[in-house]
Amino acid sequence: MKTVTLYTDGACSGNPGPGGWGAILMFGEHRKELSGGERRTTNNRMELTAVIRGLEELKEPCIVELYSDSKYVIDALEKGWAKGWKARGWVKSDKKPALNPDLWERLLDLCGVHTVKLHWVKGHADNPYNNRCDELAVSEWQKLKA
């Protein structure tokens, strides 16, 4: 299996508000930037969308080194929370409904296709790829705010 690197970030102006997401896929010398946005969304939805859209670009099962500054995404996958929410019919352990079940469903399906290795990175710090994803995401919500 090929090993690819995926950096992602989401951003929102207001929560909810106009939002954007950015992703960078890297394989060898190849690098592809992706981004998009929604008029009314949340930061967490944009974080999830960035990961989903990055994984959806892959044409075959891959080992994916995923780098995100979203504790929501990384912890829910790494600690098995999202699988637990799904198993309970999208209900959290505190009996409250899990948010964003539509996106979690898609992401869990994609994680079944690819071998995703999770890495949390500090946001707005010294990681150039994370910073570039943030620029892409912010640029997208700014287009929608006008």
Image (tube, rainbow, N blue to C red):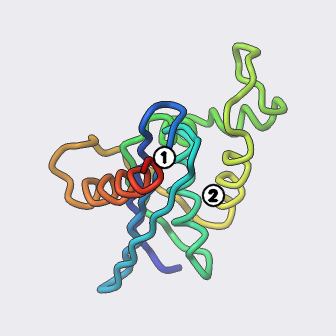
Looking at the rendering, which quadrant does residue 89 occupy? top right
Question: Disc 1 marks which residue?
Answer: 19
Q: Earlier in the sequence, mark 1 or mark 2?
A: 1
From the viewer's perspective, tell me whether residue 34 is left or right of residue 111: left
Check disc 1: other Cα within 10 Å, few if <14, some if 14-19, many if 20+.
many
Query: Residue, x 37% and y 75% (percent of image)?
Result: 26
Question: Disc 2 marks which residue?
Answer: 111
Q: Pinpoint residue 48: horizontal percent, then vertical percent.
A: 55, 48
Q: Pinpoint residue 97: horizontal percent, then vertical percent.
A: 75, 24
Q: State if disc 2 and disc 1 touch (CB < 8 Å).
A: no
Check disc 2: other Cα within 10 Å, few if <14, some if 14-19, many if 20+.
some
* Mark 2, secondary structure of its residue: helix
Q: Pinpoint residue 1: horizontal percent, then vertical percent.
A: 53, 79
Three-letter amino acid code at the position of disc 2: Cys
Nearest the viewer among 47 and 71 is 47
Looking at the rendering, which quadrant does residue 115 occupy? bottom right
Query: Residue, x 77% and y 37% (percent of image)?
Result: 86
Residue furthest to the bottom in view is 29
Looking at the rendering, which quadrant does residue 33 occupy? bottom left
